[in-house]
Image: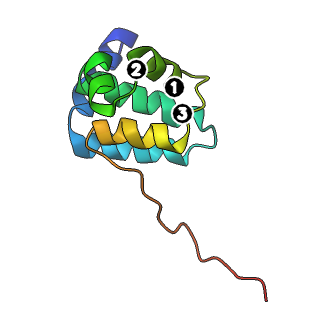
Amino acid sequence: MKKREYYEDLMGRLKDPDYAIGYLNTALEDTDKDVFLLALRDVAEAWGTMTKLARFSRIHRVSLYKILSKHGNPKVDSLSKILHGMGLKLTVTKEQEFKHAA
């Protein structure tokens, strides 16, 4: 599969909210946290224009591109706004039992 075909296929699949959520959750599991930002950018592009997302998330479009770049370092508030603009939210789940110090 050519790179362009893969990208078009991915964009098509990411339009399905359930697929997009799985894609984002898988990206969060990667040890390189930049992977999540790039995945979030992929989902944002699949769901519409960055201009539209900027309007819904109330973040300037240029700032949105910077936040979602490979070297972006967004604050939790920025991530929450972007996800909210996409109709999603950031959640925390238990990965394993935490052993409290005695």
Q: In which quadrant will I find the C terminus?
A: bottom right
Residue 36 percent location from the top left of the image: 50, 37
Work out how far the residue at label 2 is from the one at label 3, CA to CA, in angstroms. Answer: 22 Å
**Circle 1 is placed at which residue position?**
67
The type of residue carrying mark 1 is Ile
Could one spot residue 10 in this view of the protein? no
Q: Nearer the viewer, mark 3 or mark 1?
A: 1
Of the numbered discs 1 and 2, the one sitting upstream in the chain is 2
> Residue 40 or 66: which is nearer the viewer?
66
Q: Position of residue 2 (x, y in %)?
A: 37, 11
* Residue at figure coordinates x 71%, y 82% from the top left: 100
Tell me the amino acid under the disc marked 2.
His
What residue is shown with label 2? 60
Is residue 35 placed above or below 52 in the rendered structure? below
CA gap between label 3 and label 1 equals 13 Å
Q: Dot 1, how many residues are within 10 Å of its Cα: few (below 14), some (14-19), or many (20+)?
A: many
Q: Secondary structure at mark 2?
A: loop
Q: Position of residue 43 (x, y in %)?
A: 33, 30
Examine the image and state in which quarter residue 51 appears: top left
Extreme residue toward the right, this view: 102
Q: Are marks 3 and 1 in contact (CB under 8 Å)?
A: no
Give the structural element (helix, strand or loop) at label 1: helix
Residue positioned 20% across, 38% down in the render? 16
| Residue 27 drawn above or below residue 7 | below
Q: Nearer the viewer, residue 76 or 70?
A: 76
Q: Earlier in the sequence, mark 2 or mark 3?
A: 3
Residue that mark 3 sits on? 35
Q: Residues within 10 Å of mark 2 (few under 14, many from 20)?
A: few
